Amino acid sequence: MAMDQPLPVDDVTRVRREPHRQVTDRAALHAILDEALMAHVAVVRDGLPLVLPFAVARDGDTLLLHGSSGAGGLRLGAGGPVCVSVTHVDGLVFARTTFESSMRYRSAVVHGIAEVVPDDDKEHALEVLSDHLFAGRTAEVRRPSRKELAATLVLRLPLDSASVKVAAGPLEVDPEDVEPREVWAGIVPMALTAGEPVAGPDVPDDVAVPGSVVRTRQRFSG
Amino acid sequence: MAMDQPLPVDDVTRVRREPHRQVTDRAALHAILDEALMAHVAVVRDGLPLVLPFAVARDGDTLLLHGSSGAGGLRLGAGGPVCVSVTHVDGLVFARTTFESSMRYRSAVVHGIAEVVPDDDKEHALEVLSDHLFAGRTAEVRRPSRKELAATLVLRLPLDSASVKVAAGPLEVDPEDVEPREVWAGIVPMALTAGEPVAGPDVPDDVAVPGSVVRTRQRFSG
């Protein structure tokens, strides 16, 4: 799907609540997904909804979902309909009333049929996932073994049907608002941030923190 | 449900992948929910899975989901089966192989039938939500009007059927591991953190940041 084509708005993807916040720009969808470490993946199991978190990475026009070949929720999504939600909380909006209090956030919801990444593409998919989640880690460690590849399940989902909803910007003040001005109102920004790395117990003292960790800290610097 | 009764482990709630990480202590469930601002709520719509983010708060043995009386995903959950997932990413685990790389996280998944909070209980539910999300904000602002209450939809879900899964602790080093020790391995802690509050454009200079904002910054101090 070409980047200059807007995301489709239809019965599946239309934002019902606060429709003015819907964004149809594919670049906005990609930016939200590229900031995510995990996504919440919903399937229908025995007629009931089930939603579980999975590690994710975008690979071009598809979203990769990482799991295990063993038991687990991801297997349920293979070959069937899934819905994937990624949400970033960007701020808490302290309005002058409970009713107007809200959040700043960016939300992406993707709908589609997930398929198992075939064996020939699995190592590439794992590289994309690892370099996304761990900021270029594959250059620092060995390649996965055949056994490790066999024990890993990756699903991919096309990014054809997706809703993006964004609540951004400064506090909106209603000029008709009669609430007293002596009540503070404003926004507390929120962000997922990285702390100080903690080396494993067997790492020699002279081994420096690698580039992947430095980049992760830059990426999540708050 | 008494706090000293463990969470049930059955076909719905059993953790399939890494079952040793399943926790059945209700206090662990409550702690995960009490740290959450948003949850991902899944329903079945026209036979397909749909998952959307909603603001949440725990009220005793129930989970409150906040929405609007108008159009929107929350109405779909009213009276029907829902699945609610809350996940906190606590760290990125940089192992010496791609395969062993993982995350530290705490996950809660709640299953059940969501019901609409009746009018008589709605103001209480909104107070619980507001005081949870905005750290005691209701003491600083006026009560909601009838019109505001009518425009708000709150669902509640009993916390009877839930899975908790926790990946915590320091890096595990396999003594059989033959990967070279000169490859750094360790954990980068992650946390949702609050930044500097930004006052709205019409807040007089002499209005101090209120207790709710101070507490929010303490709560999310990384």
Image (cartoon, coloured by chain):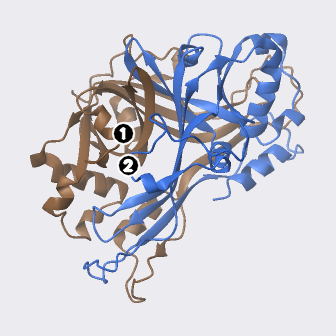
Chain colours: A brown, B blue
Q: Left of A192 or right of it: where is A131?
A: left
Residue B76 shown left or right of residue B128 in the figure: left
Which image quadrant: the N terminus of chain B? top right
Residue A36 in view of the camera: no
The chain under label 2 reads B
Viewed as shown, does residue B64 lie left or right of A191? right
Q: Which mark is residue A181?
A: none
> Along the line of sight, which residue is nearer the eye, B178 or B1?
B1
**Residue A64: x %, y % from top left:** 28, 42
In the rendered structure, the residue with mark 1 lies on which chain? A
Q: Do dots 2 and 1 share one subunit?
A: no
Residue sitting at the far left: A120
Dot 1 alpha-carbon crowd within 10 angstroms: few under 14, some 14 to 19, many 20 or more: many
Q: Residue at x 42, y 49 (%)?
A: A37
Q: What is the three-letter code of the residue carrying label 1? A: Gly
The reply to whether dot 2 and dot 1 touch (C-beta < 8 Å) is yes
User: Residue B122's spot in the image, x, y percent?
Assistant: 78, 19
Q: Is residue B143 above or below residue B75?
A: below
Q: Is residue B89 above or below residue A106?
A: below
Residue that label 1 marks = A73
The span from disc 2 to disc 1 (Cα, nearest Å) is 8 Å
User: In this figure, which residue is indicated by the disc labeled 2?
Assistant: B17
The number of discs equals 2
Q: Which image quarter holds the C terminus of chain B? A: bottom right
> Is any atom of residue B208 visible in this view?
yes
